[in-house]
Image (spheres, coloured by chain):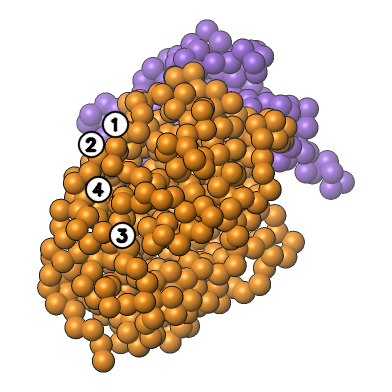
């Protein structure tokens, strides 16, 4: 029998299921197949049946290989809620947010949010998958290639990092400190793709991708899928796993028409999203125990820490330099190895590790104090941002 | 021969919307779009003013003066035509008129480029097409 959804705007919602495929650099299943495997694992994890699901949100990765037809591929019948969402890397957080809102409005009861991507195909490099030299534009948009502007995302994020270095004196050692602390967490995560310990010397010794980024400033690229299931808080308490309550959420999209006065590269959408999320959860940066931050590059972690108010604008470099983000540090951050050393499932990387930590299922890498876990998901070139604040406590947040 | 074909530097591809820009470039004039309603300068080509949403846009000359917003150094060879250039800079210039333009700095060593550096527009030839660059000013 289906759980009966009812209009309940103050009841809150929770994440009750998490399913992940193996994260690989080898092609196994297509994005559709990977999505199906992750969804099945999320259902089993939650103790739910496929028939319980009445909502499906889909986020495709760079290959854009899945969309609303995934419903049919996975045989979901009579859904009350369906959409393919796309605000790039920030979408994972947004799917969970819209699922939570729809559930509280009585539109659906159990919503699957899934991300899947298969950029690594036989004979295709990660660089080619993420916009190498193909697809010449015309007109003024064809100018960048004439200058040798290739490796799009790497180059654009490197420009953002250099802007921060130029304005605030942020150093290469400080970016390296983030690579090192993130890898230290990955050594304790069996699902991480890079588990070998790394030193600052290793960091400096890794080849340039686009200066100021070394190889070890940049995320891995992975084939895989992650699914989570969202339901109402009162229903969550009847299910198999410890509920992960959604205490706060927010979004921030600063815009960047390449004009004077727009500084989203150093003042990201997190500055907008955080106020909504902190206010909803009734907390501030001092109340956050664990940070799971979108870290496509080391710099993304640095600027995101500033924008959530863990330190002042421009002081991110000095803040991270002493290793406080790493195991045993005062500000545990990206505790599964993030995207840098763990796996690159866009916004589902921070969401998945946050669910694991909030439940207390992090094993060797579990952070003991976990009342408030911050999730940041980030899209474009620091263009789009969404925030979740998760908690194992039913009374976390002002809405519960 | 294939190697020679590949070694041709990708020249800009002029299309109808960008023709005024490239025609002016042949005379070493940097044109920007300008909104006739709110007078904002725009880059790259727009159909709608990002500031006031007007479609009443025309072309106007830029002073070509600005400063380095940010820059990176490309160490890897992504295209064989850049063999002689590696490592080369890519630079985003903040024009005094408002828009930010992706270009390169010529005449300054990579290690001497810095955020905030004053620059001025100039032109060089790529396969017969004039290409905008910036120089220390």
Residue drawn at 26 percent across, 59 percent down: A393
Res A17 → quadrant? bottom left
- Chain in orange on the image: A
Chain letter of the residue carrying label 1: B
Image depth: mark 4 or mark 2 in front: 4
- Identify the mark at residue A392; answer none if there is no mark: 3
Residue B15, can we see it? no
**Mark 3, residues whose alpha carbon is within 10 Å: few (<14), some, or many (≥20)?**
many
**Mark 1, residues whose alpha carbon is within 10 Å: few (<14), some, or many (≥20)?**
many
Point out residue A168 in the picture as x, y percentages from the top left corner. Answer: 44, 19
Q: Nearer the viewer, residue A260 or A17?
A: A17
- Marks 3 and 4, Cα distance to the nearest angstrom? 17 Å
Chain letter of the residue carrying label 4: A
Query: What residue did someone put label 2 on?
Result: B52
In the displayed structure image, the side of residue A72 where residue B5 appears, left or right: right
- Marks 4 and 2, Cα distance to the nearest angstrom? 31 Å
Task: Determine whether B75 is above or below B94 in the image.
Answer: below
- Marks 3 and 1, Cα distance to the nearest angstrom? 53 Å
Confirm whether circles 3 and 1 share one chain.
no
Chain letter of the residue carrying label 3: A
Query: What residue did someone put label 4 on?
Result: A277
- Marks 2 and 3, Cα distance to the nearest angstrom? 46 Å
Point out residue A131 in the picture as x, y percentages from the top left corner. Answer: 59, 50
Task: Determine whether A297 is above or below A55 in the image.
Answer: above
Query: What residue did someone put label 1 on?
Result: B35
């Amino acid at each position: 029998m289906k759980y009966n959804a009812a209009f309940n705007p103050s009841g809150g919602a929770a994440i009750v299921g998490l399913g992940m495929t193996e994260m690989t650099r080898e092609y196994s299943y297509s994005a559709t197949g990977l999505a199906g495997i992750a969804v099945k694992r999320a259902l089993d994890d939650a103790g739910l049946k496929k028939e319980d699901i009445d909502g499906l949100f889909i986020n495709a990765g760079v290959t854009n290989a899945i969309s609303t037809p995934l419903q049919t591929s996975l045989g979901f019948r009579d859904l009350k809620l369906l959409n393919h969402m796309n605000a790039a890397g920030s979408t994972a957080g947004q799917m969970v947010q819209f699922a939570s809102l729809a559930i509280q409005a009585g539109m659906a009861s159990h919503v699957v949010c899934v991300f899947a991507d298969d950029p690594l195909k036989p004979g295709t490099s990660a660089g080619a998958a993420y916009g190498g030299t193909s697809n010449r534009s015309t007109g003024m948009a064809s100018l960048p290639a004439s200058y040798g502007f290739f490796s799009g995302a790497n180059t654009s994020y490197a420009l953002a990092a250099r802007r921060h270095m130029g304005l605030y004196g942020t150093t290469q050692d400080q970016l390296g400190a983030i690579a090192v602390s993130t890898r230290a967490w990955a050594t304790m995560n069996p699902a991480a793709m890079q588990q070998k310990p790394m030193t600052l010397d290793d960091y400096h010794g890794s080849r340039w991708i686009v200066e100021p980024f070394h190889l070890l400033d940049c995320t891995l690229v992975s084939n895989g899928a992650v699914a989570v299931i969202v339901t109402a808080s009162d229903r969550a308490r009847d299910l198999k796993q410890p509920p992960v309550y959604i205490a706060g959420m927010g979004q921030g999209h600063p815009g960047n028409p390449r004009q004077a006065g727009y500084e989203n590269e150093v003042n990201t959408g997190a500055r907008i999203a955080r106020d909504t999320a902190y206010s909803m959860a009734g907390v501030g940066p001092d109340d956050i125990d664990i940070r799971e931050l979108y870290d496509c590059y080391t710099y993304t972690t640095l600027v995101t820490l500033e924008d959530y108010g863990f330190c002042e604008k421009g002081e991110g470099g000095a803040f991270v330099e002493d290793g406080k983000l790493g195991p045993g540090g005062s500000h545990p951050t990206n505790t599964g190895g993030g995207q840098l050393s763990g796996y690159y499932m866009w916004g589902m990387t921070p969401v998945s590790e946050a669910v694991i930590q909030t439940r207390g299922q992090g094993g060797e890498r579990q952070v003991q104090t976990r009342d408030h876990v911050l999730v940041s998901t980030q899209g474009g070139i620091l263009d789009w941002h969404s925030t979740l604040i998760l908690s194992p406590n039913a009374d976390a947040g002002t809405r519960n | 021969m294939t190697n020679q074909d590949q070694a041709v530097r990708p020249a800009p591809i002029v299309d109808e919307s960008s023709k005024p820009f490239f025609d002016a470039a042949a005379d070493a004039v940097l044109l920007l779009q300008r909104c006739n309603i709110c007078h904002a300068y725009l880059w790259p080509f727009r159909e709608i003013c990002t500031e006031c949403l007007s479609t009443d846009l025309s072309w106007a000359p830029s002073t070509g003066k600005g400063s380095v917003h940010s820059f990176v150094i490309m160490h890897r060879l992504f295209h064989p035509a850049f063999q002689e250039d590696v490592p080369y800079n890519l630079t985003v210039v903040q024009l005094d008129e408002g828009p930010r333009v992706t270009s390169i700095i010529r005449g300054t060593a990579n290690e001497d480029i810095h955020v905030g550096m004053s620059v001025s527009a100039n032109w060089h030839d790529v396969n017969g097409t004039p290409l905008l660059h910036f120089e220390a000013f």
